[in-house]
Amino acid sequence: MRKRMWMFWSVCAVAAVAVFSLSMAARAAESAPYKVVETSGNIEIREYPDLVLASTASRFSARGNDGSFMKLFRYISGNNAAGNKIEMTSPVFMEPDTAGAPGRMGFVMPQQIASRGAPAPKAGDVSIRKREGGRFAVIRFNGVMDARKADAQEQKLRQWMKTRGLESEGVAERAGYDPPFTLGPFRRNEVLIRLKSKED
């Protein structure tokens, strides 16, 4: 019995390492650039440059199962005016739903593509838009991100901001860095809140 248990836990350990390694290998090669201004535990203040996103309407509660992820994936797979395949980057940005309107999901365009102009989407429900740069408060956490967990992390971040006298601008964004098969403990998730500049 003891030997069987040892074998069982050994197999589990090997499987976990394999999934972790595969997840790290599958994580996008290029990530949206940013500069860390301040760090406090799992919270950072970051400076982001302007980013170019391929974007589509998405219900956050659906976690991409409403077809939004595949619309954007088809765009980078060649369903664009140039017929070009575009490298998958990270993170996938998600804006939460608002009253009467769905949120949005966005894939970050690689810097090389963004600099020369992203090709126009063939699908009418995909658009190319600019995500304006600026300073953001960001909290990082793992697990499978759902609305309940994201809301809880947002409240933690807002409480931290309050203690620092930082004011927000607009709604919070969510960001996911890993493919769907990644186990919860190995996932990198973030909630980002744009900060008001001192000039505002």
Image (tube, rainbow, N blue to C red):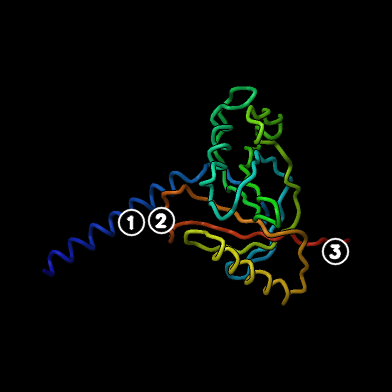
Q: Position of residue 7 (x, y in %)?
A: 17, 61
Quadrant, the N terminus: bottom left
Instruction: Tell me the CA gap for discs 1 and 2.
Output: 8 Å
User: Mark on residue 198?
Assistant: 3
Quadrant, the C terminus: bottom right
Along the viewing direction, whichever of 65 and 84 lies nearer the viewer? 65
Q: What residue is shown at x 12% (from left), y 66% (from top)?
A: 3
Q: Position of residue 174 (x, y in %)?
A: 61, 56
User: Judging from the image, what secondary structure is the residue with disc 3 in?
Assistant: loop
Q: Earlier in the sequence, mark 1 or mark 2?
A: 1
User: Judging from the image, what secondary structure is the residue with disc 2 in?
Assistant: loop
- In the picture of the structure, the residue carrying the numbered disc 1 is 16
Q: Position of residue 14 (x, y in %)?
A: 28, 55
Q: Are marks 1 and 2 in contact (CB under 8 Å)?
A: yes
User: Judging from the image, what secondary structure is the residue with disc 1 in?
Assistant: helix
Q: What residue is shown at x 58% (from left), y 67% (from top)?
A: 42
Furthest toward the right, the residue is 199
Foreground tag (1 vs 2): 2
Q: What residue is shown at x 63% (from left), y 30% (from top)?
A: 123
Give the side of residue 192 with respect to residue 144, left or right. Answer: right
- In the picture of the structure, the residue carrying the numbered disc 2 is 183
User: Mark on residue 50?
Assistant: none
